Amino acid sequence: DIAYVNGRFGPLADAVVSIEDRGFQFGDGVYEVIRTYRGQPFAIEEHLARLERSAQALQLLIGQTRDQWSCLIREGLRLSQFPETKIYLQITRGQAPRDHPFPVSSAPTTVLTFREFHPLDVSVRNAGVQAMSFEDIRWGRCDIKSVNLLANVLARQRAKEAGVFEAILVREGMVTEGSVSNVMVVRNGVVQTAPEGHRILSGVTRAFVLELARKEGIPVTESFVTREELLAASEVFLTGTTVEVLPVVRVDGYAIGSGSPGSVSRLLSRRFEALVG
Ligand code: PDD
């Protein structure tokens, strides 16, 4: 595994940052996860645009232009040589004595890691997964892809303990998104998902899938569904870099629709595979 830290590539096992890094002490940083298809990073422009938006929201200065990021990513892929790679990018406000306000002078810490990407088993994808609902206790700016992931960590851990794939987050009765994915439902033939805004991360995959749905003539609504509407939906699926389009067949033990992946989920999954393949 390969890592890049502040200007230098090397083995991931040797890569280090300071214990006074603000990412470590405050979670004061932003990140992106990009994966390759056939060795090529997917939707790099969209991910870098979101990284810039996240950084801007935190008044974090990024040292790299998009072209420079692309070069770093290409170099990391050349060095790591996996069939498929999970690329992780993180920028923090850098190293400084622990004090809450921004340090007057500190250079951001820039980290990339390149690890082998293992896609979900085809059998899991075809069968669909189970999920559970879980209270969304995150802060008010879920649109920022910050490294503060404690609420997501707790939710996914609970899902793991319950033996299900994903925790679907619910705030004041409304479904926001998953702990690592966006959530879409199909109701009366309409694909419905939470609107962009402070309550969700605007997923790169989400945007591609909504566009694919529109191209197929499937109506799309960007508005919240309640937990009850989620349970009563004819289909539920997750979208995300790591999950792609993943049918959910059970939530909180209740079967969704027929209890197996529905036709809209399967169609959008196929269209997404075609798009990236
Ligand atoms: N997570 N919502 C949340 C809370 C996420 O963490 C993610 C992605 C998504 C999907 O976004 P995208 O389609 O751009 O991957 C939605 C990454 C993969 C992670 O934290 O590992």
Image (cartoon, grey):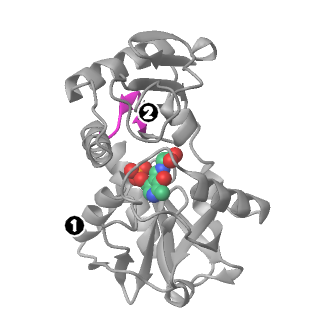
Identify the image quadrant of residue 195.
bottom left
**Residue 4's mark?**
none
Left or right of residue 190, residue 35 in this image: right
Mark 2 nearby-residue class (10 Å; few <14, some 14–19, many ≥20): many
Q: Residue at x 35, y 22 (%)?
A: 107
Residue 234 image offset from top left, x and y in percent? 50, 85
* Residue 150 appears anywhere in the view: yes
What residue sits right under mark 2 in the picture?
90
Q: If the image is split into quadrants, where does the N terminus sit?
A: top right
What residue sits right under mark 1 in the picture?
215
Q: CA distance from mark 2 to mark 1?
A: 34 Å
Q: Amino acid at mark 2?
A: Gln
Q: Residue at x 37, y 26 (%)?
A: 108
Decide: is 271 above or below 176: above
Please state the extent of the stretch shown in magenta in the rendering: 31-43
Q: Residue at x 34, y 52 (%)?
A: 204
